Amino acid sequence: MANTSIAQEVGKRRTFAIISHPDAGKTTITEKVLLFGHLLQKAGTVKGKKSGQFATSDWMQMEKERGISVTTSVMQFPYNDCLVNLLDTPGHADFSEDTYRTLTAVDSCLMVIDGAKGVEERTIKLMEVARLRDTPILTFMNKMDRDIRDPVDLLDEVESVLNIACAPISWPIGSGKEFKGVYHILRDEVILYKSGLGHTIQDVNIIKGINNPELDKRIGSFAAQLREEMELVKGASHEFDQELFLKGELTPVFFGTALGNFGVDHMLDGLVEWAPVPQPRATENGIVAADNPNFSGFVFKIQANMDPKHRDRVAFFRIVSGKYEKGMKVRHVRTGKDILISQALTFVAGDREHLDEAFPGDIIGIHNHGTIKIGDTFSQGDSIQFTGIPNFAPELFRRIRLRDPLKQKQLLKGLVQLSEEGAVQVFRPLDTNDLIVGAVGVLQFDVVVSRLKFEYNVDAIYENINVATARWVYSNDGKALDEFTNKASQNLALDGGDNLTYIAPTMVNLNLAMERYPKIKFHKTREH
Ligand code: GDP
Protein backbone atom coordinates (compact mmCIF):
# COMPACT_ATOMS: atom_id res chain seq x y z
CA MET A 1 0.00 0.00 0.00
CA ALA A 2 1.48 3.33 -1.04
CA ASN A 3 1.49 6.36 1.18
CA THR A 4 0.85 9.77 -0.41
CA SER A 5 2.89 11.95 1.91
CA ILE A 6 5.84 9.60 1.56
CA ALA A 7 5.34 9.54 -2.20
CA GLN A 8 5.51 13.35 -2.21
CA GLU A 9 8.78 13.35 -0.31
CA VAL A 10 10.16 10.65 -2.61
CA GLY A 11 9.24 12.76 -5.63
CA LYS A 12 11.40 15.60 -4.34
CA ARG A 13 14.53 13.58 -3.76
CA ARG A 14 17.53 12.86 -6.00
CA THR A 15 20.45 10.87 -4.62
CA PHE A 16 23.64 10.81 -6.66
CA ALA A 17 27.42 10.41 -6.55
CA ILE A 18 30.21 11.95 -8.59
CA ILE A 19 32.68 9.70 -10.36
CA SER A 20 35.85 10.94 -12.05
CA HIS A 21 39.54 10.45 -12.54
CA PRO A 22 41.63 12.24 -9.88
CA ASP A 23 42.12 15.94 -10.73
CA ALA A 24 39.25 16.09 -13.19
CA GLY A 25 37.48 18.46 -10.79
CA LYS A 26 35.25 16.42 -8.50
CA THR A 27 36.09 18.43 -5.38
CA THR A 28 35.69 21.74 -7.16
CA ILE A 29 32.35 20.79 -8.64
CA THR A 30 31.18 19.53 -5.23
CA GLU A 31 32.04 22.91 -3.74
CA LYS A 32 30.05 24.73 -6.45
CA VAL A 33 27.10 22.39 -6.14
CA LEU A 34 27.03 23.15 -2.43
CA LEU A 35 27.21 26.85 -3.18
CA PHE A 36 24.07 26.55 -5.30
CA GLY A 37 22.49 24.38 -2.65
CA HIS A 38 23.28 26.81 0.19
CA LEU A 39 24.45 23.66 1.91
CA LEU A 40 21.86 22.31 4.27
CA GLN A 41 23.47 19.29 5.78
CA LYS A 42 26.85 17.81 5.42
CA ALA A 43 28.42 14.61 6.68
CA GLY A 44 32.15 14.17 6.83
CA THR A 45 34.12 16.68 4.83
CA VAL A 46 34.07 17.59 1.19
CA LYS A 47 37.61 16.26 1.07
CA GLY A 48 39.48 19.20 2.40
CA LYS A 49 42.50 18.67 0.21
CA LYS A 50 42.51 22.36 -0.41
CA SER A 51 39.66 23.70 1.62
CA GLY A 52 41.56 23.23 4.86
CA GLN A 53 38.51 21.99 6.75
CA PHE A 54 39.81 18.49 7.27
CA ALA A 55 40.08 18.19 11.02
CA THR A 56 38.40 15.09 12.39
CA SER A 57 40.26 11.91 13.11
CA ASP A 58 43.90 10.99 13.25
CA TRP A 59 44.04 8.54 10.43
CA MET A 60 42.55 11.10 8.13
CA GLN A 61 45.91 12.77 8.50
CA MET A 62 47.04 10.18 6.03
CA GLU A 63 44.54 11.29 3.46
CA LYS A 64 45.72 14.81 3.93
CA GLU A 65 49.37 13.96 3.52
CA ARG A 66 48.72 11.98 0.41
CA GLY A 67 46.03 14.27 -0.93
CA ILE A 68 43.59 11.47 -1.45
CA SER A 69 40.10 10.93 -0.23
CA VAL A 70 39.56 7.70 1.64
CA THR A 71 36.17 8.28 3.15
CA THR A 72 32.72 8.79 1.80
CA SER A 73 30.86 11.88 2.80
CA VAL A 74 27.19 12.67 2.52
CA MET A 75 25.70 16.05 1.83
CA GLN A 76 22.10 17.13 1.51
CA PHE A 77 20.97 20.39 -0.06
CA PRO A 78 17.87 21.90 -1.63
CA TYR A 79 17.88 22.80 -5.32
CA ASN A 80 14.83 24.25 -7.05
CA ASP A 81 11.94 22.30 -5.51
CA CYS A 82 14.07 19.24 -4.84
CA LEU A 83 16.22 17.88 -2.06
CA VAL A 84 19.47 16.51 -3.41
CA ASN A 85 21.68 14.00 -1.62
CA LEU A 86 25.26 13.93 -2.83
CA LEU A 87 27.51 11.06 -1.79
CA ASP A 88 31.21 11.55 -2.23
CA THR A 89 33.31 8.57 -3.27
CA PRO A 90 37.00 7.92 -2.80
CA GLY A 91 38.84 8.77 -6.00
CA HIS A 92 41.74 6.42 -5.42
CA ALA A 93 41.65 3.03 -7.10
CA ASP A 94 42.65 1.24 -3.90
CA PHE A 95 39.27 1.97 -2.39
CA SER A 96 37.16 0.75 -5.28
CA GLU A 97 35.24 -1.67 -3.10
CA ASP A 98 34.10 1.23 -0.98
CA THR A 99 33.08 3.05 -4.12
CA TYR A 100 31.08 0.07 -5.35
CA ARG A 101 29.12 -0.08 -2.12
CA THR A 102 28.53 3.66 -2.17
CA LEU A 103 27.13 3.35 -5.67
CA THR A 104 24.58 0.81 -4.40
CA ALA A 105 23.17 3.66 -2.30
CA VAL A 106 22.62 6.18 -5.13
CA ASP A 107 20.11 6.38 -7.97
CA SER A 108 22.27 8.24 -10.48
CA CYS A 109 25.87 9.37 -11.07
CA LEU A 110 27.58 12.43 -12.41
CA MET A 111 30.68 11.67 -14.46
CA VAL A 112 33.17 14.55 -14.53
CA ILE A 113 35.68 14.61 -17.37
CA ASP A 114 38.65 16.94 -17.82
CA GLY A 115 38.05 18.49 -21.24
CA ALA A 116 41.77 18.68 -21.94
CA LYS A 117 42.36 15.04 -21.13
CA GLY A 118 39.19 13.21 -22.12
CA VAL A 119 38.32 9.77 -20.79
CA GLU A 120 40.97 8.62 -18.30
CA GLU A 121 41.72 5.27 -16.73
CA ARG A 122 39.82 5.74 -13.44
CA THR A 123 36.79 7.02 -15.31
CA ILE A 124 36.70 3.76 -17.24
CA LYS A 125 36.92 1.66 -14.06
CA LEU A 126 34.30 3.66 -12.21
CA MET A 127 31.93 3.55 -15.15
CA GLU A 128 32.28 -0.22 -15.19
CA VAL A 129 31.24 -0.24 -11.56
CA ALA A 130 28.35 2.17 -12.05
CA ARG A 131 27.07 0.15 -14.98
CA LEU A 132 26.97 -3.10 -13.07
CA ARG A 133 23.68 -1.68 -11.85
CA ASP A 134 22.76 0.29 -15.00
CA THR A 135 22.88 3.51 -13.02
CA PRO A 136 21.81 6.56 -15.08
CA ILE A 137 24.80 8.81 -15.81
CA LEU A 138 25.02 12.57 -16.38
CA THR A 139 28.27 13.98 -17.77
CA PHE A 140 30.05 17.26 -17.09
CA MET A 141 32.90 18.22 -19.44
CA ASN A 142 35.04 20.39 -17.21
CA LYS A 143 37.78 23.01 -17.57
CA MET A 144 36.43 24.87 -20.62
CA ASP A 145 38.51 27.82 -19.41
CA ARG A 146 41.55 25.83 -20.50
CA ASP A 147 42.55 24.78 -23.98
CA ILE A 148 40.49 21.67 -24.37
CA ARG A 149 40.22 19.00 -27.01
CA ASP A 150 37.72 19.28 -29.82
CA PRO A 151 34.32 18.77 -28.14
CA VAL A 152 33.15 16.49 -30.95
CA ASP A 153 36.20 14.28 -30.30
CA LEU A 154 35.42 14.25 -26.59
CA LEU A 155 31.92 12.96 -27.22
CA ASP A 156 33.20 10.39 -29.69
CA GLU A 157 35.66 9.16 -27.12
CA VAL A 158 32.99 8.80 -24.43
CA GLU A 159 30.79 6.90 -26.86
CA SER A 160 33.46 4.52 -28.08
CA VAL A 161 35.47 3.95 -24.89
CA LEU A 162 32.62 3.94 -22.39
CA ASN A 163 30.03 2.55 -24.73
CA ILE A 164 27.30 5.03 -23.86
CA ALA A 165 25.49 7.36 -26.26
CA CYS A 166 26.04 11.10 -25.70
CA ALA A 167 23.32 13.72 -25.93
CA PRO A 168 24.88 17.19 -25.65
CA ILE A 169 22.57 19.50 -23.70
CA SER A 170 24.89 22.46 -23.88
CA TRP A 171 27.74 23.25 -26.27
CA PRO A 172 30.91 25.26 -25.56
CA ILE A 173 31.70 28.42 -27.45
CA GLY A 174 35.47 28.68 -27.70
CA SER A 175 37.75 27.52 -24.91
CA GLY A 176 40.71 28.66 -22.82
CA LYS A 177 41.19 32.43 -22.88
CA GLU A 178 38.58 32.58 -25.63
CA PHE A 179 35.89 30.70 -23.72
CA LYS A 180 32.74 32.73 -24.37
CA GLY A 181 30.09 30.57 -22.75
CA VAL A 182 27.76 27.79 -23.78
CA TYR A 183 24.81 27.37 -26.07
CA HIS A 184 22.01 25.57 -24.25
CA ILE A 185 20.64 23.41 -27.04
CA LEU A 186 17.30 22.53 -25.43
CA ARG A 187 16.54 26.07 -24.31
CA ASP A 188 17.90 27.66 -27.49
CA GLU A 189 19.84 30.27 -25.57
CA VAL A 190 23.43 31.35 -25.19
CA ILE A 191 24.71 31.90 -21.68
CA LEU A 192 27.76 34.15 -21.67
CA TYR A 193 30.76 33.42 -19.48
CA LYS A 194 32.60 35.93 -17.37
CA SER A 195 35.83 34.83 -15.76
CA GLY A 196 36.89 35.44 -12.19
CA LEU A 197 33.49 34.88 -10.58
CA GLY A 198 33.95 31.25 -9.61
CA HIS A 199 33.36 31.72 -5.92
CA THR A 200 29.91 33.26 -6.38
CA ILE A 201 26.57 32.51 -7.91
CA GLN A 202 26.74 34.80 -10.92
CA ASP A 203 24.03 36.87 -12.55
CA VAL A 204 23.23 35.03 -15.72
CA ASN A 205 23.82 36.78 -18.99
CA ILE A 206 21.50 35.21 -21.53
CA ILE A 207 20.95 35.79 -25.23
CA LYS A 208 17.76 34.19 -26.46
CA GLY A 209 17.95 32.32 -29.78
CA ILE A 210 20.98 31.19 -31.72
CA ASN A 211 20.07 33.48 -34.63
CA ASN A 212 19.70 36.57 -32.48
CA PRO A 213 21.87 39.36 -34.02
CA GLU A 214 22.73 40.44 -30.49
CA LEU A 215 24.90 37.33 -30.35
CA ASP A 216 27.09 38.59 -33.22
CA LYS A 217 27.49 41.89 -31.41
CA ARG A 218 28.57 40.22 -28.21
CA ILE A 219 30.85 37.43 -29.36
CA GLY A 220 31.74 38.47 -32.89
CA SER A 221 32.82 35.73 -35.27
CA PHE A 222 32.20 33.07 -32.62
CA ALA A 223 28.48 33.47 -33.34
CA ALA A 224 28.72 32.38 -36.98
CA GLN A 225 31.08 29.59 -35.98
CA LEU A 226 28.62 28.36 -33.37
CA ARG A 227 25.76 28.27 -35.89
CA GLU A 228 27.87 26.25 -38.27
CA GLU A 229 29.03 23.89 -35.56
CA MET A 230 25.49 23.32 -34.30
CA GLU A 231 24.38 22.16 -37.75
CA LEU A 232 27.09 19.58 -37.61
CA VAL A 233 26.50 18.58 -33.99
CA LYS A 234 22.77 18.15 -34.45
CA GLY A 235 23.38 15.79 -37.35
CA ALA A 236 26.08 13.79 -35.63
CA SER A 237 24.91 13.43 -32.04
CA HIS A 238 22.00 11.90 -30.20
CA GLU A 239 18.99 13.77 -28.94
CA PHE A 240 18.25 13.49 -25.26
CA ASP A 241 15.97 10.55 -24.53
CA GLN A 242 14.68 10.14 -21.01
CA GLU A 243 14.03 6.44 -21.33
CA LEU A 244 17.52 5.61 -22.62
CA PHE A 245 19.00 7.82 -19.91
CA LEU A 246 17.13 5.92 -17.21
CA LYS A 247 18.37 2.64 -18.66
CA GLY A 248 21.95 3.91 -18.47
CA GLU A 249 22.34 3.77 -22.24
CA LEU A 250 22.53 7.49 -22.95
CA THR A 251 24.14 10.35 -21.04
CA PRO A 252 23.20 14.04 -21.21
CA VAL A 253 26.42 16.06 -21.56
CA PHE A 254 27.03 19.53 -20.12
CA PHE A 255 30.06 21.73 -20.78
CA GLY A 256 31.47 24.26 -18.36
CA THR A 257 34.12 25.12 -15.85
CA ALA A 258 33.79 24.09 -12.24
CA LEU A 259 36.51 26.51 -11.19
CA GLY A 260 34.67 29.36 -12.91
CA ASN A 261 31.38 28.06 -11.52
CA PHE A 262 29.93 28.10 -14.98
CA GLY A 263 27.61 25.41 -16.33
CA VAL A 264 27.31 23.62 -13.00
CA ASP A 265 23.77 24.98 -12.61
CA HIS A 266 22.78 23.62 -16.04
CA MET A 267 23.89 20.21 -14.88
CA LEU A 268 21.93 20.58 -11.63
CA ASP A 269 18.83 21.64 -13.57
CA GLY A 270 19.19 18.46 -15.65
CA LEU A 271 19.74 16.36 -12.56
CA VAL A 272 16.58 17.46 -10.79
CA GLU A 273 14.54 17.31 -13.99
CA TRP A 274 15.67 13.94 -15.33
CA ALA A 275 17.49 11.88 -12.72
CA PRO A 276 15.40 9.17 -11.11
CA VAL A 277 13.67 9.64 -7.79
CA PRO A 278 14.65 7.12 -5.09
CA GLN A 279 14.36 3.74 -6.73
CA PRO A 280 13.07 0.44 -5.37
CA ARG A 281 15.65 -2.03 -4.10
CA ALA A 282 15.76 -5.83 -4.30
CA THR A 283 15.46 -8.09 -1.28
CA GLU A 284 15.71 -11.85 -1.03
CA ASN A 285 11.91 -12.03 -1.37
CA GLY A 286 11.12 -9.33 -3.90
CA ILE A 287 11.27 -5.62 -4.53
CA VAL A 288 10.60 -2.87 -1.98
CA ALA A 289 9.22 0.36 -3.47
CA ALA A 290 10.11 3.74 -2.00
CA ASP A 291 6.52 4.66 -1.19
CA ASN A 292 5.97 1.52 0.84
CA PRO A 293 4.84 2.90 4.22
CA ASN A 294 7.06 0.54 6.21
CA PHE A 295 10.46 1.98 6.99
CA SER A 296 13.37 0.00 5.56
CA GLY A 297 16.93 0.43 4.34
CA PHE A 298 20.45 -0.94 4.38
CA VAL A 299 23.91 -0.10 5.67
CA PHE A 300 26.45 0.51 2.90
CA LYS A 301 29.28 1.96 4.90
CA ILE A 302 30.61 2.08 8.40
CA GLN A 303 32.99 4.78 9.40
CA ALA A 304 34.95 4.93 12.60
CA ASN A 305 35.87 7.89 14.67
CA MET A 306 34.79 10.64 12.38
CA ASP A 307 35.26 12.93 15.27
CA PRO A 308 37.88 12.27 17.96
CA LYS A 309 35.48 13.68 20.56
CA HIS A 310 33.09 10.81 19.85
CA ARG A 311 35.16 7.67 19.58
CA ASP A 312 32.40 5.53 18.18
CA ARG A 313 31.39 4.29 14.80
CA VAL A 314 28.69 5.52 12.50
CA ALA A 315 26.78 3.26 10.13
CA PHE A 316 25.69 5.03 6.93
CA PHE A 317 22.22 3.91 6.13
CA ARG A 318 20.29 4.43 2.89
CA ILE A 319 16.56 4.69 3.48
CA VAL A 320 14.73 2.59 0.87
CA SER A 321 11.11 3.00 2.00
CA GLY A 322 8.90 4.59 4.61
CA LYS A 323 9.72 7.41 6.95
CA TYR A 324 12.34 7.72 9.65
CA GLU A 325 11.07 9.36 12.79
CA LYS A 326 13.12 10.15 15.80
CA GLY A 327 12.85 7.45 18.45
CA MET A 328 11.28 4.85 16.19
CA LYS A 329 11.68 1.15 16.77
CA VAL A 330 12.95 -0.99 13.93
CA ARG A 331 14.09 -4.55 13.45
CA HIS A 332 17.79 -5.19 12.94
CA VAL A 333 17.12 -8.12 10.66
CA ARG A 334 20.42 -10.02 10.99
CA THR A 335 20.27 -10.15 14.78
CA GLY A 336 16.47 -10.33 14.96
CA LYS A 337 16.46 -7.64 17.62
CA ASP A 338 14.17 -4.63 17.71
CA ILE A 339 16.16 -1.51 18.38
CA LEU A 340 15.35 2.09 19.05
CA ILE A 341 16.95 4.55 16.64
CA SER A 342 16.78 7.62 18.76
CA GLN A 343 19.62 9.59 17.35
CA ALA A 344 20.06 9.38 13.64
CA LEU A 345 22.74 11.77 12.56
CA THR A 346 23.31 14.31 9.92
CA PHE A 347 26.24 16.68 10.01
CA VAL A 348 25.84 20.39 9.69
CA ALA A 349 29.01 22.35 9.04
CA GLY A 350 31.15 19.77 10.77
CA ASP A 351 29.03 19.48 13.90
CA ARG A 352 26.85 16.55 14.60
CA GLU A 353 23.16 17.24 14.46
CA HIS A 354 20.27 15.03 15.29
CA LEU A 355 17.50 14.63 12.86
CA ASP A 356 13.76 14.38 13.37
CA GLU A 357 12.64 12.80 10.14
CA ALA A 358 14.05 11.46 6.91
CA PHE A 359 12.69 9.82 3.78
CA PRO A 360 13.63 7.36 1.03
CA GLY A 361 16.80 8.39 -0.79
CA ASP A 362 18.17 10.07 2.33
CA ILE A 363 21.25 8.81 4.09
CA ILE A 364 21.25 8.81 7.87
CA GLY A 365 24.01 7.97 10.30
CA ILE A 366 23.29 5.52 13.09
CA HIS A 367 25.50 5.19 16.15
CA ASN A 368 27.05 1.83 16.33
CA HIS A 369 28.99 0.06 19.00
CA GLY A 370 30.05 -2.90 16.93
CA THR A 371 26.69 -4.60 16.36
CA ILE A 372 26.02 -3.22 12.89
CA LYS A 373 27.76 -4.59 9.82
CA ILE A 374 27.90 -3.50 6.21
CA GLY A 375 24.95 -4.92 4.29
CA ASP A 376 22.67 -5.08 7.33
CA THR A 377 18.99 -4.37 6.77
CA PHE A 378 16.75 -2.51 9.20
CA SER A 379 13.03 -2.74 8.67
CA GLN A 380 9.65 -2.11 10.17
CA GLY A 381 7.29 -4.99 9.68
CA ASP A 382 8.63 -7.86 7.60
CA SER A 383 12.03 -9.39 8.13
CA ILE A 384 13.42 -8.54 4.73
CA GLN A 385 17.06 -8.63 3.65
CA PHE A 386 18.32 -6.28 0.93
CA THR A 387 20.72 -7.89 -1.53
CA GLY A 388 23.54 -6.67 -3.72
CA ILE A 389 26.02 -5.22 -1.23
CA PRO A 390 29.00 -7.49 -1.75
CA ASN A 391 32.49 -8.10 -0.44
CA PHE A 392 35.01 -8.75 -3.18
CA ALA A 393 37.66 -11.43 -2.79
CA PRO A 394 40.88 -9.60 -1.92
CA GLU A 395 43.77 -9.73 -4.34
CA LEU A 396 46.59 -8.72 -2.01
CA PHE A 397 47.55 -10.53 1.19
CA ARG A 398 49.94 -9.97 4.05
CA ARG A 399 50.54 -11.63 7.38
CA ILE A 400 50.12 -9.14 10.20
CA ARG A 401 52.19 -9.44 13.35
CA LEU A 402 52.46 -7.49 16.59
CA ARG A 403 55.56 -5.82 17.85
CA ASP A 404 54.23 -6.45 21.37
CA PRO A 405 52.87 -10.01 21.50
CA LEU A 406 50.79 -9.30 24.61
CA LYS A 407 48.25 -7.36 22.61
CA GLN A 408 46.99 -10.22 20.46
CA LYS A 409 43.42 -9.82 21.70
CA GLN A 410 43.37 -6.11 20.91
CA LEU A 411 44.78 -6.79 17.47
CA LEU A 412 42.12 -9.36 16.68
CA LYS A 413 39.37 -7.08 17.93
CA GLY A 414 40.68 -4.20 15.83
CA LEU A 415 40.97 -6.31 12.71
CA VAL A 416 37.51 -7.81 13.06
CA GLN A 417 35.99 -4.36 13.55
CA LEU A 418 37.89 -2.93 10.62
CA SER A 419 36.75 -5.82 8.46
CA GLU A 420 33.12 -5.21 9.45
CA GLU A 421 33.61 -1.66 8.28
CA GLY A 422 34.92 -2.92 4.98
CA ALA A 423 38.28 -1.20 5.50
CA VAL A 424 40.09 -4.50 5.00
CA GLN A 425 39.45 -8.24 5.25
CA VAL A 426 40.91 -10.53 7.87
CA PHE A 427 41.44 -14.29 7.74
CA ARG A 428 42.30 -16.66 10.56
CA PRO A 429 43.72 -19.95 9.23
CA LEU A 430 42.16 -23.05 10.84
CA ASP A 431 45.55 -24.69 11.43
CA THR A 432 47.79 -21.86 12.60
CA ASN A 433 47.69 -18.77 14.79
CA ASP A 434 48.55 -16.46 11.91
CA LEU A 435 46.43 -13.48 11.06
CA ILE A 436 46.18 -12.73 7.37
CA VAL A 437 45.02 -9.38 6.08
CA GLY A 438 43.51 -9.19 2.60
CA ALA A 439 42.95 -6.05 0.57
CA VAL A 440 41.74 -5.02 -2.83
CA GLY A 441 44.17 -2.05 -3.02
CA VAL A 442 47.58 -1.66 -1.41
CA LEU A 443 46.80 1.61 0.40
CA GLN A 444 44.28 -0.25 2.53
CA PHE A 445 47.20 -1.94 4.31
CA ASP A 446 48.63 1.41 5.37
CA VAL A 447 45.26 2.69 6.53
CA VAL A 448 44.82 -0.41 8.69
CA VAL A 449 48.19 -0.21 10.44
CA SER A 450 47.70 3.47 11.09
CA ARG A 451 44.19 2.97 12.45
CA LEU A 452 45.25 0.02 14.61
CA LYS A 453 47.79 2.27 16.19
CA PHE A 454 45.57 5.29 16.78
CA GLU A 455 42.30 3.59 17.56
CA TYR A 456 43.34 0.32 19.19
CA ASN A 457 46.75 1.25 20.47
CA VAL A 458 48.49 -1.71 18.86
CA ASP A 459 51.72 -1.56 16.94
CA ALA A 460 51.52 -4.00 14.07
CA ILE A 461 53.76 -4.80 11.13
CA TYR A 462 53.30 -6.79 7.96
CA GLU A 463 55.20 -9.75 6.59
CA ASN A 464 54.96 -11.15 3.11
CA ILE A 465 52.93 -14.29 2.72
CA ASN A 466 52.50 -16.69 -0.13
CA VAL A 467 48.81 -16.25 -0.96
CA ALA A 468 47.52 -15.63 -4.46
CA THR A 469 43.78 -15.48 -3.94
CA ALA A 470 40.86 -16.33 -1.67
CA ARG A 471 37.40 -17.76 -2.24
CA TRP A 472 34.43 -18.05 0.06
CA VAL A 473 33.33 -21.68 0.14
CA TYR A 474 29.84 -23.12 0.55
CA SER A 475 28.04 -26.38 0.02
CA ASN A 476 24.50 -27.66 0.38
CA ASP A 477 25.99 -31.05 1.12
CA GLY A 478 26.96 -31.07 4.80
CA LYS A 479 28.92 -34.28 4.54
CA ALA A 480 30.96 -33.07 1.56
CA LEU A 481 31.68 -29.83 3.41
CA ASP A 482 32.91 -31.70 6.50
CA GLU A 483 35.16 -33.87 4.43
CA PHE A 484 36.50 -30.87 2.54
CA THR A 485 37.09 -29.00 5.80
CA ASN A 486 39.11 -31.92 7.19
CA LYS A 487 41.16 -32.64 4.11
CA ALA A 488 41.86 -29.09 3.01
CA SER A 489 42.19 -27.53 6.46
CA GLN A 490 45.73 -26.28 5.80
CA ASN A 491 44.18 -23.99 3.15
CA LEU A 492 41.09 -22.94 5.08
CA ALA A 493 40.49 -19.90 7.21
CA LEU A 494 37.63 -17.99 8.82
CA ASP A 495 37.05 -14.40 7.76
CA GLY A 496 36.02 -11.54 10.07
CA GLY A 497 32.41 -12.77 10.02
CA ASP A 498 33.42 -16.43 10.63
CA ASN A 499 32.72 -17.45 7.03
CA LEU A 500 34.78 -20.34 5.71
CA THR A 501 37.33 -19.21 3.14
CA TYR A 502 39.75 -21.08 0.92
CA ILE A 503 43.19 -19.44 0.88
CA ALA A 504 45.12 -20.46 -2.24
CA PRO A 505 48.90 -20.12 -2.55
CA THR A 506 48.60 -20.17 -6.37
CA MET A 507 45.85 -20.05 -8.97
CA VAL A 508 46.87 -23.58 -10.01
CA ASN A 509 46.24 -24.76 -6.48
CA LEU A 510 42.80 -23.15 -6.51
CA ASN A 511 41.88 -24.76 -9.81
CA LEU A 512 42.98 -28.15 -8.57
CA ALA A 513 40.92 -27.77 -5.40
CA MET A 514 37.85 -26.80 -7.45
CA GLU A 515 38.29 -29.90 -9.61
CA ARG A 516 38.85 -32.15 -6.66
CA TYR A 517 35.85 -30.96 -4.65
CA PRO A 518 33.03 -30.52 -7.18
CA LYS A 519 30.37 -30.36 -4.46
CA ILE A 520 31.98 -27.27 -2.96
CA LYS A 521 31.16 -23.84 -4.37
CA PHE A 522 34.00 -21.32 -4.52
CA HIS A 523 32.75 -17.71 -4.57
CA LYS A 524 34.63 -14.59 -5.58
CA THR A 525 32.16 -12.27 -3.87
CA ARG A 526 30.24 -12.63 -0.68
CA GLU A 527 27.00 -10.88 0.11
CA HIS A 528 27.07 -9.37 3.53
P1 GDP B 1 39.47 16.07 -8.01
O1 GDP B 1 40.77 15.39 -7.74
O2 GDP B 1 38.71 15.43 -9.12
O3 GDP B 1 38.65 16.29 -6.78
O4 GDP B 1 39.85 17.50 -8.64
P2 GDP B 1 39.89 18.93 -7.96
O5 GDP B 1 38.53 19.52 -7.87
O6 GDP B 1 40.70 18.89 -6.74
O7 GDP B 1 40.62 19.74 -9.13
C1 GDP B 1 41.94 19.42 -9.54
C2 GDP B 1 42.63 20.69 -10.02
O8 GDP B 1 41.97 21.20 -11.18
C3 GDP B 1 42.60 21.79 -8.99
O9 GDP B 1 43.82 22.51 -9.05
C4 GDP B 1 41.44 22.67 -9.45
O10 GDP B 1 41.59 24.01 -9.06
C5 GDP B 1 41.54 22.52 -10.96
N1 GDP B 1 40.25 22.73 -11.61
C6 GDP B 1 39.05 22.18 -11.30
N2 GDP B 1 38.09 22.61 -12.15
C7 GDP B 1 38.70 23.46 -13.01
C8 GDP B 1 38.25 24.25 -14.11
O11 GDP B 1 37.07 24.27 -14.47
N3 GDP B 1 39.20 24.98 -14.74
C9 GDP B 1 40.50 24.99 -14.38
N4 GDP B 1 41.35 25.76 -15.07
N5 GDP B 1 40.96 24.28 -13.35
C10 GDP B 1 40.08 23.52 -12.67
Image: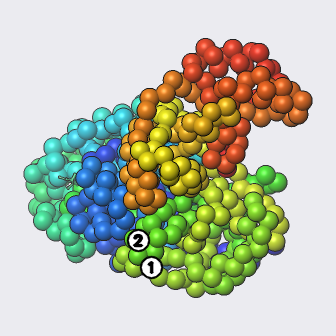
Residue 352, numbered label: 1
Q: Which residue is mark 2?
A: 307
* Position above or below: 180 against 432: below
Towards the viewer: 243 or 405: 405
Count of numbered circles on the image? 2
Q: Is residue 423 left or right of residue 161?
A: right
Side (left or right) of 330 relative to 123: right
Residue 68 on image: x %, y % = 31, 50
* Outermost residue to the front: 406
Residue 232, image quadrant: top left
513 over 45 or under it: above or below:
above
On-image quarter of the N terminus: bottom right
Q: Which element is circle 1 on? A: strand
Q: Is residue 285 left or right of residue 402?
A: right
Q: Residue placed at 31% from the left, 72% from the top? A: 35
**Dot 2 amino acid type:** Asp
Q: Earlier in the sequence, mark 2 or mark 1?
A: 2
x and y percentages locating residue 347 in the rendered image: 44, 76
Q: Are marks 2 and 1 in contact (CB under 8 Å)?
A: yes
Give 56 or 380, whichever is nearer the viewer: 56
Amino acid bearing label 1: Arg
Q: Is residue 341 visible?
A: yes
The answer to whether any part of residue 101 appears in the image is no
Question: Which residue is drawn at the image coordinates 79% and 60% (left, top)?
Answer: 384
The spot of residue 390 in percent (x, y) is 63, 45
Residue at figure coordinates x 37%, y 65% from the top left: 57
Alpha-carbon distance for marks 2 and 1?
A: 9 Å
